[in-house]
Image (cartoon, rainbow, N blue to C red):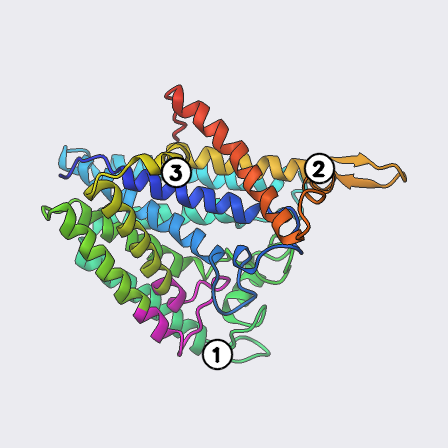
């Protein structure tokens, strides 16, 4: 049981990668279905599932693999050295995505999706390697309650305490102290992957870590699935209640958002686990498994290519310059669909399939890019 291969985890990882590429690649950002965009501020959409799912999966995979290695006699120091190396590489890859193609070091964004994954992976692994599951649960509670207390009780100069508005809150103030000139270009005064909000994101990773311990237990597979689904409902209710006191907000990664999205992650992964690993219905999941086996490479490549086709331009008949991506979208997808929302979605689906095809070629040749 402890060393079983979790096809469901590969599939869930692939589902998350496919979702990430889908929401990152609309034909037009101004013409996209609301569920394929982040909530404007408080609240959530399908898009707000994706990032916490990534961190949750990191936690599951981390515990599942490292606990096995500890039982084989590997030292914690050697394991953490490997974690630190991987985290450094992931952080560097995120930095590369931020700096290409302009290579402007003066204004390059330092935070990012891969950077947050790297930090949460490193901190989560350090906690997992030094604390038992019960203590890890206490870490989750401490991180979430501590973050909420900080956001509501620590005063911000010229504002005071308790503000939760865009750019007007403790997290934004801390970003302004350390990241000025190197933040998200669309805000410039705060970053959705900023410093303070990384702490509750670590708690998301630890939710995955605890799930990993459940999966390695001696329970039957059916019992494991049942517990994941039950825990998912509990977290959904808890996160919904917490929303009354601290709004669900992805940009601030609020404590309520952390618990609420852990609930969705447990429900989704629990469903994948029950269908694929308990019932044995695996053929339908092949699409997602292909992505899941080369998740990091697929994500990195999709973002890099998108940045390049936006950067390079083509000259139109009137002499103006248009991004290569926009020119292709306008020439191919817009004429095909009367509804611009459907045209935008079709582009995102087609873009997704391009990188799935690349992942499929790698899969068929048994090439799995690891770090």
Q: Residue furthest bottom?
A: 160
The residue lying at 29 percent from left, 55 percent from top is 266
Q: SS class of the residue under badge 2?
A: helix
User: Can the viewer see residue 127 in this picture?
Assistant: no
Name which quarter of the figure residue 62 lies in.
top left
Q: Which residue is mark 3?
A: 288
Is residue 252 placed above or below 99 in the rendered structure?
below
Q: SS class of the residue under badge 1?
A: loop
The residue lying at 63 percent from left, 53 percent from top is 341
Residue 19 lies left or right of residue 219; in this view the side is right
Q: Which residue is mark 2?
A: 328
Range drawn in magenta: 237-259
| Residue 175 x %, y % | 54, 61
Rounded to the nearest angstrom, the CA distance separating label 3 from label 2 is 27 Å
| Residue 184 x %, y % | 60, 54
| Residue 307 x %, y % | 63, 39
Q: Earlier in the sequence, mark 3 or mark 1?
A: 1
Q: Which residue is mark 1?
A: 162
Q: Earlier in the sequence, mark 2 or mark 1?
A: 1
Q: Is residue 258 magenta?
A: yes
| Residue 31 x %, y % | 65, 55
């Amino acid at each position: 049981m402890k060393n079983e291969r979790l096809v469901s985890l590969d599939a869930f990882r692939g589902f998350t990668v496919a979702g990430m590429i889908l929401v990152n690649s609309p034909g037009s950002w101004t013409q996209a279905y609301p569920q394929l965009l982040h909530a404007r501020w408080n609240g959530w959409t399908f898009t707000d599932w994706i990032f916490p799912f990534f961190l949750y999966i990191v936690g599951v995979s981390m515990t599942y693999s490292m606990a096995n290695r500890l039982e084989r006699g590997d030292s914690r120091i050697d394991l953490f050295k490997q974690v630190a190396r991987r985290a450094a590489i992931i952080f560097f890859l995120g930095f590369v995505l931020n700096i290409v193609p302009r290579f402007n070091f003066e204004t390059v964004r330092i935070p990012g999706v891969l950077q947050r994954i790297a930090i949460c992976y490193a901190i989560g692994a350090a906690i997992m390697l030094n604390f038992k599951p019960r203590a890890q649960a206490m870490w989750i509670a401490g991180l979430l309650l501590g973050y909420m207390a900080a956001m509501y009780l620590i005063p911000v100069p010229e504002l005071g305490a308790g503000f939760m508005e865009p750019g007007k809150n403790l997290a934004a103030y801390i970003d302004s102290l350390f990241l000025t000139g190197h933040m998200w270009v669309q805000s410039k005064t705060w970053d959705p992957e900023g410093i303070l909000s990384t702490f509750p994101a670590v708690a998301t990773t630890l939710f995955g870590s605890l799930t990993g311990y459940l999966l390695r237990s001696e329970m039957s597979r059916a019992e494991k699935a049942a517990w994941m689904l039950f825990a998912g409902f509990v977290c959904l209710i808890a996160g919904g209640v917490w929303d009354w006191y601290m709004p669900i907000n992805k940009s601030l990664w609020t404590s309520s958002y952390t618990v609420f999205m852990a609930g969705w992650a447990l429900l989704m992964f629990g469903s994948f686990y029950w269908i694929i690993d308990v019932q044995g219905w695996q053929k339908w999941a092949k699409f997602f498994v292909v992505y899941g086996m080369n998740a990091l490479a697929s994500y990195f490549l999709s973002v890099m290519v998108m940045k390049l086709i936006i950067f390079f331009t083509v000259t139109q008949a009137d002499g103006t310059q248009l991004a290569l991506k926009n020119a292709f979208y306008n020439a191919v997808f817009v004429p095909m669909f009367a509804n611009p929302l459907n045209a935008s979605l079709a582009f995102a689906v087609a873009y997704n399939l391009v990188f799935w095809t690349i992942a499929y070629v790698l899969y068929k040749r048994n090439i799995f890019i690891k770090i």
